Amino acid sequence: MVGIKDIANQAGVSISTVSYALNNSPKVKEETRSRIMKIADEMNYIPNMAGRTLKRQQTNLIGVYLTNYGGSFYGSLLEGVTKTLGRHGYDMIVCSGTKSHLFLPEKLIDGAIILDATFPTAEIEKYAERELNIVVLDRELESEKVCHVLLDNQAGTTLALDYLLAQSPTKTYIVTGPDHTYDSNIRLAIAKQELERFEHIEYEVLEGNFTKESGMRAAKKIAEKNEKNVAVFCLNDEMAIGMYDYLAKTDLEIGKDIRIIGFDHSEVSRYIQPRLATVDYSMYKWGAVAAEKILALLEGTPAKSERIYTTLIRGESVEGVQD
Amino acid sequence: MVGIKDIANQAGVSISTVSYALNNSPKVKEETRSRIMKIADEMNYIPNMAGRTLKRQQTNLIGVYLTNYGGSFYGSLLEGVTKTLGRHGYDMIVCSGTKSHLFLPEKLIDGAIILDATFPTAEIEKYAERELNIVVLDRELESEKVCHVLLDNQAGTTLALDYLLAQSPTKTYIVTGPDHTYDSNIRLAIAKQELERFEHIEYEVLEGNFTKESGMRAAKKIAEKNEKNVAVFCLNDEMAIGMYDYLAKTDLEIGKDIRIIGFDHSEVSRYIQPRLATVDYSMYKWGAVAAEKILALLEGTPAKSERIYTTLIRGESVEGVQD
DNA sequence: TTGTACGCGTTATCAG
DNA sequence: CTGATAACGCGTACAA
């Protein structure tokens, strides 16, 4: 490892002069600077992160925590984060592994963006108490110290449900996510509230866990009842796709016997036949806004929590195939 | 920040005793240890990464570098990496941002797994010279110091092409990826070699860049020629799907007028109609093997390069819809 | 068994 | 303009 000390030796100056030169301090003659720079370059010098961090007490790194229900990874969300952070001199790392939760209190990262239901809320609150910078995307916390960037589940759920009910189904099902996830719980709560507004609507809640398999299981249950003109609100697309998989083996027709709507506007929802109705929102924007918030926190600006709006995507899975 | 020093004060011992206690050294009485542990816990002590790293000269962090052609992010590859690393006390971070390339020489990470065509080969070679641990997944290097875990493009390409040619197309097209990517170049080279083995086969290479848009452009070019029974080998699924998008607006029938095969067995390829023929391989395994190699390098074991095998996925996009 | 003291690589203060 | 020197937080050889 070639360090600042080696350069100093080579150049015949002291280490502090080298440091000044490297950090473009005006306290060093232009001539010595360029000479030192040249030597540093020749020696392939690259500053050591640990040393620098120890002194500066910040890393310019932001950590992102994700869970990965079933495989669709949040590509454009991450793009939104990186691009935004990049404009402000920060880099992004996606953290994963047993000890990764410690990166924040260990000061490996200057802030965290959390979209990971397996990250315990108690832990987040503990870190928030320590004045660590956190933006959460998947839960609501009491603490004023963490910033929230949440999906507008309220609008999305209402839109989806109203669209579904407009087809006058004889019965409506809701397939939920894991019961500890915020998005699932909030969507379920709003959907129930909406459904109970009309007394004459019969509905049933089926437990799922946001995976394709749980969607298949739900479809099986529904199919076995042998009802006609049923409506299903899957609280994410993944489960809706699982339903498709199961129903392909039956003679129930999607969009007619059974109407399905999802949530997320996943890639597959656009190509599956019949086209899946769903709820859309911009992953990119979600990431970008989260990044803006973390940057605000880092500057000490109090960051206002924000919502990412959602829109309805109509589809043949609800209205049937029109020719 | 509460540090080892604060604990020493609180417990009325010296910092080294605290350090010993924390690191389970046998050099400290069990009684003092537990007392110190308790105090550390009460004070919410968490060791500072920079300090520790500076001393230990390793972070137990492995960095993964990815590019993201078009949005499909490598979820299960990352899962393969994390799971494998986790069993050996390492954590994974996915690195992204302008300065992230420096993490390796800066010693923020103990090793790097690279699947990112935008990461310059020259840079990788420079780092390899410095004895930094690197596993590459997307190129072939001279250096004996870096380990390769590559797809078996040879088998995949041959399989795909033979399947396509078995339909006796009148003309065959190959749609390439960006010309600086290894996977594209090697697939193209092998395909060409295979095609030229039979003199009577007419074929043409169309330039693409692994994105959906480039697939659409290629489809347009092909459609305009108005040929019948054409075969197209898209060097990845993404472009094949772009072709579907374009062809949906024409009256050409996929699997009959135009036969298409892709590469990657993406999620969408399984759901699109008609089902896309493609080449499969295990992303999870790819990640897991890459992780094993990096671990081997870290232990000083010379890691043998390895290939990830590929298999053919037949589909209606080549054979047509059978009822 | 515990304490002292040094070093890891940087940055930054303070004299010269 | 430059050099010595003290942090930063932790680990550990050596001394007590």
Image (spheres, coloured by chain):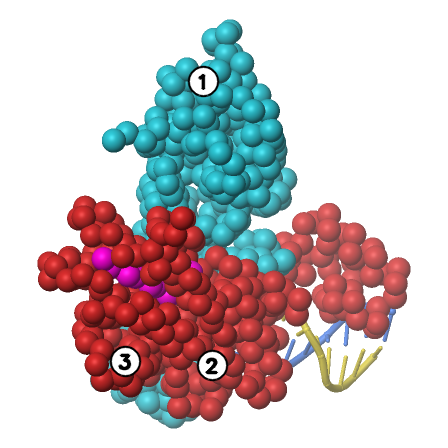
Chain colours: A cyan, B red, C blue, D yellow
Residue B259 at x, y = what percent?
Answer: 28, 61
Residue name at image x 41 percent, y 15 percent: A168
Residue under mark 3: which chain is it in?
Answer: B
Give the camera-side residue of A174 and A102.
A174
Q: Residue furthest front?
A: B323
Residue B258 lies within the magenta run: yes
Q: Please, what secondary structure does the residue beneath circle 3 have?
A: helix
Q: Amino acid at mark 1?
A: Pro
* Secondary structure under the numbered disc 2 in the rendered image: strand
Residue A296 image point, x, y percent = 37, 44
Number of other residues with Cα within 10 Å of mark 1, as a class: few under 14, some 14 to 19, many 20 or more: many
Q: Which residues are magenta?
A: B257-265
Give how far apart the Cα atoms at labels 2 and 1 are. 56 Å
Q: Label 3 crowding class (10 Å Cα cut-off): few <14, some 14-19, many 20+?
A: some
Does residue B130 show up?
Answer: no
Which residue is tagged 1?
A: A169
| Residue closer to the observer: A214 or A19 | A214
